Amino acid sequence: MTTAARRTVTLTVNGAARSAPAEDRTLLSDFLRHTLRLTGTHVGCEEGVCGACTVLLDGEPVRSCLLLAVQAQGRTVETVEGLADDGRLNALQRTLKETHGLQCGFCTPGVLMSLTAAEREGLDEEETAGQVLAGHRCRCTGYAGIRAAVAARHRAPGGPRQAPRGGGAEAAG
Amino acid sequence: MTAAPAGPGPDDTTARPDAPQQPTGGPIGRSVPRLHDDRLLRGQGRFTDDIDDGTALHAVVLRSPVAHGRLTRFDAGAARADGRAVLVLGPDEIARHTRPLPTVWRIRGQRQDTIELAPRTVRYAGQPVGLVVAAGRAEAEDVAELVETGYEPLPAVVGTDAALADGAPLVHPEYGGNTAGSARFGDSEDEVERALAGAAHVVTRELGVQRVAYTSLETRALLAEWTPGTEQLTVWAGTQVPHPFRYGLARALRLRVDQVRVAVPDLGGAFGGKTVLHADETLVCLAARLLGRRVAWTEDRAEALTASYQGRGMSATARLGLDADGRFVALDAHITGDVGAFVSQAGTGPFQVAAQAIEGPYRFGRAGASVRAVWTNAVPTGAYRGYGMQEACWIRERLVAEAARELGLPAAELRRRNLIGPEELPYTTRTFSTYDTGDYPRALHSAEQAVADAPRVREGRIRRGAAAVPSIEATGYGPTSLLEAAGMEAGGWESGRIRVNEDGTVTVFAGVVAMGQGIETALAQIVADRLGVPLGLVAVRLGDTDTTPRSEFSSQASRSVVVAGGALMRAGARMRERMHALAASLLETSAEDVRLDVEGEDEPVFRAAKTSRTATWAQVAHRGWLGWGRPDPDRIVLEETVDFDPPGLTYAYAAHAAAVAVDLDTGQITVEGYWAFSDSGPLVNPMIAEGQIAGAVAQGLGIALTEEAALDPSTGLPLTTSLRDYELPAPATVPTALHLSHTSTPGTVAPGGFKGLGEGGMLPAPVVVANAVADAVPEIARRLERTPLSPYRVWTMLRDAGLATG
Ligand code: FES
Ligand code: FES
């Protein structure tokens, strides 16, 4: 391959308009991490298996390692950096901390984004712990603390069912 | 103040009222949330690949596409002519600028004692032969494609059987055979043979544990910067062992160690995979040095699965002899370890540990194990979590279960007759391990009770069964004298340093490393507890060769809390004494009259009972640094450093139970319930401890069921190059019914009675699953000799037993 084609990608990330050049072949994960310097999104496999790179694209959880940056042109991306509310951990983040749902924290951003989407969609505990977590690999926790977080969120007053939908950051519960 | 006594200090006695096993209300023993979770949850972790702000060059490693061959052509002409190439290094340049890496843990007879960085003879697919550097990773990959290489193929040696066969091709012809070295542990072969000959019953099995890939979710990564003016190499590296990493780099690059700084950013898991300096990491640093620039490298997943060292990979012929009463009269294992292309820094260590740990919690009349380390054309092996001990547990508990089955005895009864009882401790095994404290029968009893009512179904297409097994974990490596005697070039001590700053904050420096296990929180708890200050005052600094104490082992082998925590227990007691003495001088009273009061997270206050005067902790610290009112004229700096070399190993233990279902139509095994009863002494943070155990159990289930780093038997090329082929335990692999409980028997080795627990959860998991499968499907019990028990492998056994058709 010789000189790669480049174009400017304009998109909304965590509520802010961003614009930067990208080669056609640049993955969305690399664009977020290295071009926009949003390194909270992690890359564990670059082949769609581990889920660490999960972000929300127009509200839908997607694997940013399976998308090109140019595919996000004009769209809205939410990453882990957008979850905290004015620097304060949101309710889901706090729960994951309380249930020891993270160890090294490498898988955590992807898990948080998938769980955020599941809460907005109103998925129940079984669907979340079953289908949603099935899309993630965590090498550290044995999933125990992550499942405990899902359970705790579904028990909590003002839990996921009441969580607001839409593109903004989730309100602290 | 006088120097601390060399022997066990007063903090070692369990009777002392403020020893942590007596709840003090202090931070030790509390499940406080981890100190660094917030930034990880915000996406503000700083992992190695996050550091580059766009100024670094990027490296791509050129690797051998063949398992065995001679590199006959390395033509970088076209690559160098490409405008995007910044640097292309081939084997000749690399050899010119470097020396080989040193090895650390060798086995008797091992003559290969260095590791070549980029040899012309390649011995595994994925071995580095060169490096390309360009402005970005994609450009470096483009340039790498322009490097033209040619190989003269040599026959690949795959697996130890092939390596040891008559006329096998030699991996290292200069040594005249494929055996890298061998050793015997415990009783001699003759003695064990005699005991076996006198046994009423002998069970023999060919038992094996597959090679596995560490697969931390963050792969290895490095950012290296050479500063030409000061001639300093700064390396941010995802390593568990910054000091040995620095030593190896300095040796290889012909630098002084003080020209190299290794700093460890956040680690996305490690599990032993980051305990050695690999050749490729060294090449990235060489590139930085030659260019006088910053060079970044992050391994991709395919490299992690094929070119990073791997764990396990052993097979053993093992025999258990019993007398007519079912007592274990003899245990023997002949372990063959597949060390791969060369013996890595610690390559034979896991196999030696398997031999050393062969007895577990049982009494044997005679016991011994032989290890033979064998070169093959596979990627070299290293130290994966629970190494050696997990393999030993697999060997031992498969033999015990099979003996019970053959003798028609309940396995629980057979184990009870042979378990070492609490009244027998301390107990020295035939391989000279001295177990300190515990109650192994009690732990096993709990595990057996847990599955007493688990379904046992031997009819229909879904079978169900259960099992329980005990295990022992040697923790707190290690007494330095033991390592020296074992011929390991490593010290087992740790140094802990506590600094009370002039504003009263406390900074702790230790040689261990945070890799997600939560050690910084645990050490902060220990120090806050010993000083009697709120946790919020304490910050922990780890993993930087410029500032943190030297450590050889750092965080591995379940030792961080035991050894580094032990050092800090003592340093904390000393610092507490000094602060009290300083406060007494300010308050014009005796140290005994001074009390440190703490209300929540408020600033602690010293109170003199007699004079009713008070001074804040920060005031006392500030005066201390001024040197005012010091009781000892020669001591000013408010730092206490203690070197702790544990007098022995301390043995944690556990018993695990599993309930499984086996689908006779598919060979699929489902773990439906899992119980772990662990004892690692007093727990500093029970929440963190449980997280460690749950994670280790999951990795054990990976060995049991899903993971295998396989090679093509004829070409030696890796078959598992992505996470699609290399199956990590998924949520569905780990039962929701995962029950963890603890007892807390203090050990006698470390201050606080702490024992390690990072690996223990992994040790019995594979064999308890296999034994439960044997319980469910006794028709295939005889053949459950190797992991993973993948559906295909199990289905094949079921078909051969006439239970499945296909
Ligand atoms: S990095 Fe995208 S799924 Fe693993
Ligand atoms: S917390 Fe380490 S991979 Fe999930």
Image (tube, coloured by chain):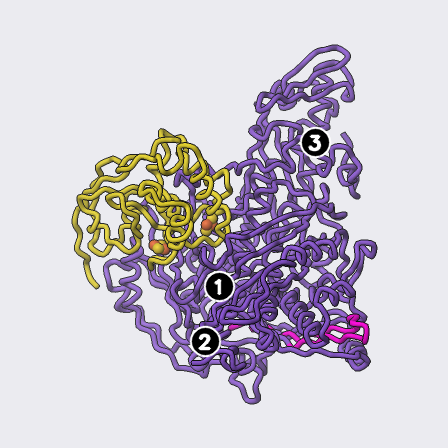
Chain colours: A yellow, B purple
Q: Amino acid at mark 1?
A: Ala
Label 3, label 1: how many angstroms apart (C-alpha)?
A: 43 Å
The nearer-to-camera label among 3 and 1 is 3
Circle 3 SS class: loop
Q: Earlier in the sequence, mark 2 or mark 1?
A: 2
Task: Give residue B69's position: percent from left, percent from top.
Answer: 43, 79
The nearer-to-camera label among 2 and 1 is 1
Counting other residues with Cα less than 10 Å from the Cα at mark 2, is it few (<14), some (14-19), or many (20 or more)?
Answer: many
In which quadrant is the N terminus of chain B drawn?
top right
Q: Amino acid at mark 2?
A: Thr
Label 3, label 2: how many angstroms apart (C-alpha)?
A: 61 Å
Name the subunit of mark 3: B
Name the subunit of mark 2: B
B58 left or right of B389 in image: left
- The image quadrant that residue B766 belongs to is bottom right
Label 3 CB, ligand 2: below 8 Å? no
On residue B102, which mark appears? none
Q: Amino acid at mark 3?
A: Thr
Task: Give residue A114's position: percent from left, percent from top.
Answer: 35, 46
Circle 1 SS class: strand
On residue B213, which mark appears? 1
The nearer-to-camera label among 3 and 2 is 3
B753 left or right of A148 in image: right
Q: Is residue B261 visible?
A: no
